[in-house]
Amino acid sequence: MGRDITRADGKLGWGILGPGNIARRFAADLPASRTGVLVAVGSRDIDKANKFAAEFGGARGYGSYEELLNDDEVDAVYISTPHPQHAQWAIRAAEAGKHILCEKPLTVNHAEAMAVIEAAREHDVFLMEAFMYRCVPQTEKLLELLREGAIGTIHQIEASFAFGSRPNPGSRLWDAELAGGGILDVGGYPVTMARLIAGAAVGKPFADPESLTAVGRVGETGVDEWAAANLTFAGGVSAHVVTGIRHSAENVVRIVGSEGYLVVSNPWLPGRDGGSSGIDVYRIGEEDRHVEVEPTALYAAEADSVADHLAERQSPAMSWADSLGTAATLDSWRQAIGLTYPSERIDANRPTVHGRPLARRAEHTMRYSEIPGVAKPVSRLVMGVDNQTALPHATAMFDDFFERGGTTFDTAYIYGRGMCERVLGQWIKNRGIRDEVVVIGKGAHTPHCDPESITRQLHESLERLQTDYVDVYFMHRDNTDYPVSEFVDVLDEHFRAGRIKAFGGSNWTLERIAEANAYAQANGRQPFVAVSNNFSLARAMDVPWAGCLAVSDDESRTWLETNQLALMPWSSQARGFFTGRAKPEDRSDAELVRCWYSDDNFERLARAQDLAQRRGVDPTAIALAYVLHQDFPTFPLIGPRAMAETHSSLAALQVELSPEEVRWLDLRD
């Protein structure tokens, strides 16, 4: 767990990981801080570490990053390694209980940023992305002027940070393998400024863009040499941002409002090396004025922001949510100009974010059960693979789920137009764990719900998944124009060929499943062993998609209890009904209202909230625990888009419900 300041002088003891050029600036400014002192320097070159430490007053140098992280006198680390190493060493630092100031970009992409933030949360350490301009008086004054209406209503933001350099494949700036280019090197400055100002326009700490369009040039070395983007925000605010490493730009911030405009001529390095500081205000009907701001040591201000907010574990200067939003925006900017780094491509062999081999945690809390025909432990929670279409995001999410004990992944032929199967297959191949995971596939979705389509789609799915079998195969829909015998026959054929180990029906009526199994028994075929229909504590009033079916009613529950078929329910948490989004007076989410709003469901929500408060968990954990505590086997599908959502679902595994509580939650008592 993270610790507070331990030095006798009350100052935060800093260690530097990666003594490069930017680290020199941090180390040079640190003596000017109120709160920090350099203790140690870590490098892969011990001579370089010792020389750097001696130059800037550090007590010692280390020839490895691991040694520095083991130094008890180091309270916090400043990470200034090349971009692709940020995530790994931020996670390692969090695991060592060190507070973290990580150079921008926090990580190469949003997926890695998510993993770093979850590590900081889990190990209770401070974490901040090092945009030093966010910590200085000039930026504070800018926000003050905007909030007091110095230029009226904010309308347009222009921000740029670009510089000229010569193409050099030996430099990290020009190396795609090292995530070079302008967007990740300095493009975060105009993006974070635009998000900051757009937030101020609506009274929030920051705002995420609603849309982004961009142009840019990706050069011969595979990095962006010049790029420009237009961002639109809520409230009619727009921004134009520019970055580049091939040519310099004006490198100012200009904000236009209903009553004039203002200019920050030196937004990123105010006062440094004798440069200007302050803000020029041009308001209609008033004298132009220059608002002078006392310059400060930039990196000292950054270090002080860490120490001043250590107890909160994040600084308002650059919060975790702000960094996540920035990472997502930079991802979108790169995507818009067609820039994908080699390590992010669909066929890349991506390492784990923490850099260690994939392994289940010894202390994981996952539970397991069995499904007939599947000779592997089936995790009680199933990772839905329906929203992961990029390998970096998928890899981070799947690694995390697997390390927390998850074995089972549910995907389908139609998800992401095939990309979800591709990223799952690539991840499994990269990790070499096909024998350790349970893959659930689905095919024959309307309008191709017929026996012939099953065969065609199954072969294509196996190719995408890079495997010769799936563990469980569901028909994604039913088609009553065909007798059940034709579906059973083709599924049995693939079972006997070894392409599927077990099968079932998704969005099939229980009557049709019973008919199918009666045919199978009478004709020596394999039966359906599982069903994947909707089931949750909140009973569906309508279904999200045509052709879907729910089995939350009493009659269906009785059938499942009698027949003991495994249920793998989708929307097992009622698509966010228990997250706090659902309120009788809030009807802004039409789908939520249509499918889940009823007096009975709001009473179930109230009971889940009451029990959650008594148990010290979130209502979502109670709702998911309800599904896990049925008198028939259940394997709820969860569809997290972020690691935090995965972790909140895992909390349900620790909730024990009595039969009486299960009945009470469902209004049966």
Image: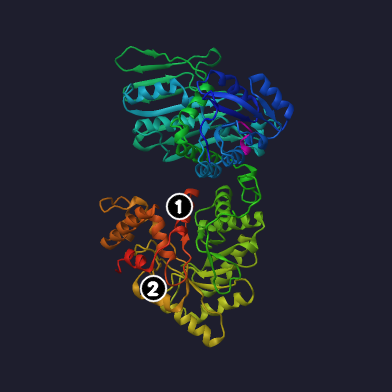
Asked whether residue 221 appears in the rendered view, the answer is no
Residue under pointer 2:
557
Residue under the image location 51 percent in, 58 percent down: 383
Amino acid under label 1?
Ser
Separation of residues labelled 2 and 1 (CA atoms)? 26 Å
How is this picture coloured? rainbow
Helix, strand or loop status at disc 2:
helix
Label number found at residue 347: none
x and y percent of residue 47 in the render? Answer: 74, 26
Asked if 288 appears above or below 586 in the picture, the reply is above
| Direction from residue 500 to residue 646 in the image, left or right | left
x and y percent of residue 254 in the render? Answer: 43, 23
Mark before the other along the chain sequence, 2 or 1: 2
- Quadrant containing the C terminus is bottom left
Q: Is residue 84 magenta?
A: yes
Badge 1: residue crowd in 10 Å (few <14, some 14–19, many ≥20): some
| Direction from residue 452 to residue 207 in the image, left or right | left
Residue under the image location 30 percent in, 50 percent down: 588
Asked if 521 appears above or below 604 in the picture, the reply is below
The span shown in magenta is 79-85
Helix, strand or loop status at disc 1:
helix
Residue under pointer 1:
648
Asked whether residue 416 appears in the rendered view, the answer is yes
Badge 2: residue crowd in 10 Å (few <14, some 14–19, many ≥20): some
Image quadrant assignment for residue 208 = top left
x and y percent of residue 65 in the render? Answer: 66, 35
